[in-house]
Image (cartoon, rainbow, N blue to C red):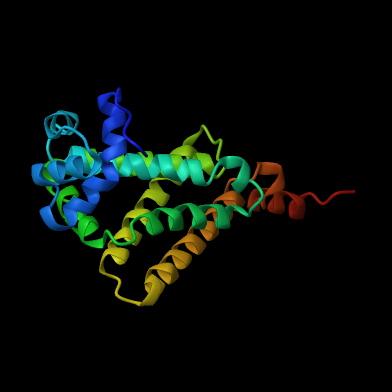
Amino acid sequence: MAVPADATLDELRLALAPAVAQAAIFDGWSDAAIDGAAQAEGVDPAVARLAFSGGPMTLIAAWIARIDADMAAALPAETLAKLPIRERIRRLVQYRLDALGGSEEALRRALAIMAMPQNAPRSIRLGWASADAMWRLAGDTATDYNHYTKRAILGAIYSATLGVYAQDQSEGHAETRAFLDRRIEGIMRFEKAKARVLKPRDESFSLTRLFGRLRYPAR
């Protein structure tokens, strides 16, 4: 994403986010990373610092927002609609992991910052927003409590997968892929079990109805 000359601060954050992440590999999520990214992209460092004012979490949030935006552009809902639901989720998460390739050290530093108690509320909101973006692209339209349970579960799985990815030394991150596949299979089993439990009363087994039929058999 080229940086337009008349970019707003929000647009500037998104445009510079990948370069900031690359600089964070060596400089951490710091002003030095902002300066390095600005120099690489031909942006006034003072303007870049203004765009990223707010500390390390502002830098990390911009990186996540850029990945969210790139994911939506690369995997639009109409493309994913042709696939089974588990494959939609797997591709969305895998896209995000692939986007982190080469930035594992920046990810490790980001996860450490996000895990700090003072950053927990914002980290949770960021995770929720990414999970929501994935479910919406996957075609989820739930508005009841399913809306919340699906996002909470996917957010937890994605967070755990990031932790595995950050430490994964296997070729092609094979361990992370296997971990992700197991967790997605767990989501699918949970959704199937939930659907059985929540069937309409007239479609599900009723012990009371069975006893009634035994006592008063149909004629």
**Quadrant in the rendering for residue 68:** top left
Q: Residue at x 75, y 55 (%)?
A: 214
**Quadrant in the rendering for residue 127:** top left
Eyeballing the image, is 117 above or below 167?
above
Question: Exactly how many numbered labels are in the figure?
Answer: 0
Task: Pick the residue in front: 119 or 31.
Answer: 31
Task: Pick the residue in front: 117 or 47.
Answer: 47
**Quadrant in the rendering for residue 65:** top left
Q: Position of residue 197 (x, y in %)?
A: 57, 50
Q: Where, quadrant-wise, is the N terminus in this rendering?
A: top left
Residue 120 visible, this angle:
no
Eyeballing the image, is 179 above or below 34?
below
Q: Residue at x 23, y 53 (%)?
A: 22
Task: Pick the residue in front: 42 or 169.
Answer: 42
Left or right of 147, for residue 120 = left
Q: Position of residue 206 (x, y in %)?
A: 66, 50
Q: Residue at x 41, y 44 (%)?
A: 131
Left or right of 185, for residue 167 = left
Left or right of 4, for residue 34 = left
Task: Pick the residue in front: 108 or 24.
Answer: 24
Q: Position of residue 16 (x, y in %)?
A: 26, 40
Residue 36 visible, this angle:
yes
Q: Position of residue 167 (x, y in %)?
A: 26, 69
| Farthest front residue in view | 42
| Farthest right residue in view | 219
Q: Residue at x 16, y 28 (%)?
A: 47
